[in-house]
């Protein structure tokens, strides 16, 4: 059986990074029986998390490229010294 107690749901929302305003709105929708609004809130937060993830992935790619260039430059310098 799935635990959908208020405490468990609230903790899950916190763990997912939802702020207090979002959590409060989620429970307001829950109290009103507005399931579609609850899903909309969760979907919107999920989209925000994905956007943040993609921003961080792009930053990692930039660092990886710089590391690659530095290593390539170092290897070229080492090869010239051997000649």
Image (cartoon, grey):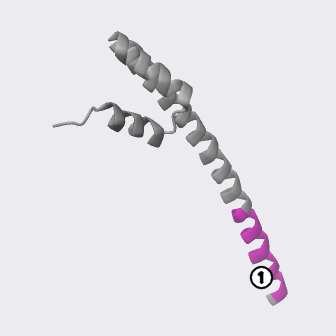
Residue 73 is one of the magenta-drawn residues:
yes
Quarter residue 19 falls in: top right
Residue 63 locus on image (x, y percent):
70, 57
Q: Is residue 63 in view?
A: yes
Residue 8 locus on image (x, y percent):
33, 38
Q: Give the quadrant of the N terminus.
A: top left
Q: Give the quadrant of the C terminus.
A: bottom right
Residue 64 locus on image (x, y percent):
66, 59
Q: Is residue 17 above or below residue 31?
A: below
Q: Which residues are magenta?
A: 67-81
Residue name at image x 58 percent, y 34 percent: 51
Q: Which residue is mark 1?
A: 79
Residue name at image x 43 percent, y 16 percent: 28
74 to the left or right of 68: right
Q: Main secondary structure of the magenta part?
A: helix
Q: Residue furthest bottom?
A: 82
Residue name at image x 41 percent, y 14 percent: 37
76 to the left or right of 20: right
Residue 68 vs residue 11, the one in the foreground: 11
Quarter residue 21 falls in: top right
Q: Is residue 44 in view?
A: no
11 to the left or right of 60: left
Residue name at image x 36 percent, y 10 percent: 32
Quarter residue 27 falls in: top left
Crowd rating for badge 1 (residues with CA inside 10 Å; few <14, some 14–19, many 20+): few
Q: Secondary structure at mark 1?
A: helix
Residue 82 is one of the magenta-drawn residues:
no
Residue 35 vs residue 43, the one in the foreground: 35
Residue 31 vs residue 18, the one in the foreground: 31
Q: Is residue 12 above or below residue 34?
A: below
* Tally of numbered tags: 1
């Amino acid at each position: 059986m799935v635990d959908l107690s208020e405490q468990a749901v609230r903790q899950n929302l916190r763990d997912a990074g939802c702020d207090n305003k979002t959590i409060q709105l989620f429970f307001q929708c829950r109290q009103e029986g507005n399931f579609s609004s609850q899903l909309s809130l969760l979907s919107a937060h999920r989209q925000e998390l994905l956007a943040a993830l993609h921003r961080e992935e792009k930053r990692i790619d930039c660092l990886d490229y710089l590391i690659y260039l530095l290593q390539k430059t170092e290897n070229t310098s080492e090869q010239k010294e051997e000649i």
